[in-house]
Amino acid sequence: MNNSRAKNKILSAIGVLAAGALTLSMAACAGSEEPADTGADETKIVLGADDGTEEHWTILKDKLAEEGIELEVRTITDAVQLNQGVQDGELDVNLFQHLIFLSDFNVNSGGTLVPVGATAVYPLALYSEQYKSVEEIPEGATVALPNNPTNLARALLNLQRAGLLELEDGGDAFSTEADITSKKIEILPVDSNQTVTALKDGSAQAAIVNNTQAQKGGLGDDLIIFKEDLDNPELAPYINAFVVKEENKDDPRWEKLIEAYHSPEVEEAVTELNQGNLQFKGDWTAADLQKELTGLEDKLRAAK
């Protein structure tokens, strides 16, 4: 897992549509209100991302330019800043996070952010340099996994599917180590940036590593011994999405942004960047995503 001020508002048209030049002229003479100029620029999108220099952004910029929209991509590596930037109006939209991460921000930081378009879901795979399969992992072996709550829960679910542990009531997107009822292995939670290090320095014999860290750490697909089924509906909380402030969710620019992102050229570049380790979710509508987010937020509030 996808990190500040004047607030952008959608231009709103105020007035009544009239038919006929005479009526329009009379309305103008009568001092009818002109559309309010709130300072929003419908010909530009300021987007925050944690990988703004990658090739697919250039292709996306060109696609949107054909629609008369200038795309400015700002690289921000801090996740909180990426969300707070949208919340505060410094950014129009961001792309770096999945729905479960977004729900955590909204609930714990009082955010009012919503997804307006899905991009893809990325695997959280189990890697090992010592073993060729899950079955080879011996009793008591150490497995490193990311310690941030959202990816920790996902990693635990992954290990359960691999048959290495069991979670109370089958677990969910909010599971913790306390929910483990039985296990074959020892768990070593570490910062997500250290999962590859733990694997390579011998601290762990296997590790759950996200796709970005695996690439940075030089872990090839040949070292994957268990991978999620990206068609599994249980992975819905981990769909990545374009995120905006709720009051701006109906801005027509988002439809053009999402359509351009799912163009063959952009998807091809994103696929190449991720070495094919992803599944696009362009069939998820904004309504689908927002319903999923609401459910996650309700569960998180109930858990608190």
Image (cartoon, rainbow, N blue to C red):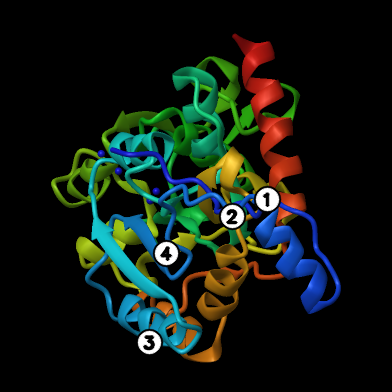
Residue 238: x %, y % from top left: 57, 49
The 10 Å Cα crowd at callout 1, few under 14, some 14 to 19, many 20 or more, is: few
Q: Looking at the picture, tell me which residue is in the foreground, 216 or 126.
A: 216
The 10 Å Cα crowd at callout 2, few under 14, some 14 to 19, many 20 or more, is: few
Residue that appears at 81% across and 68% down: 23
Relative height, residue 190 to residue 23 (above, below): above
Q: Which residue is mark 2?
A: 35
Q: Which numbered disc, 2 or 1, marks the residue that appears first in the sequence?
A: 1
Residue 45 visible (yes or no)? yes
The 10 Å Cα crowd at callout 3, few under 14, some 14 to 19, many 20 or more, is: some
Tag of residue 62: 3
Q: Which residue is mark 4?
A: 224
Residue 10: x %, y % from top left: 55, 51
Residue type at tag 3:
Asp
Residue that appears at 49% across and 40% down: 155
Q: Which residue is mark 1?
A: 14
Q: Check contact, mark 2 vs mark 1: CB within 8 A.
A: yes
Q: Check contact, mark 2 vs mark 4: CB within 8 A.
A: no
Which tag is nearer the camera, tag 2 or tag 4?
2
Cα gap from disc 3 to disc 4, whole angstroms: 36 Å
Quick check: 224 left or right of 77? Answer: right
Residue that appears at 42% across and 61% down: 41
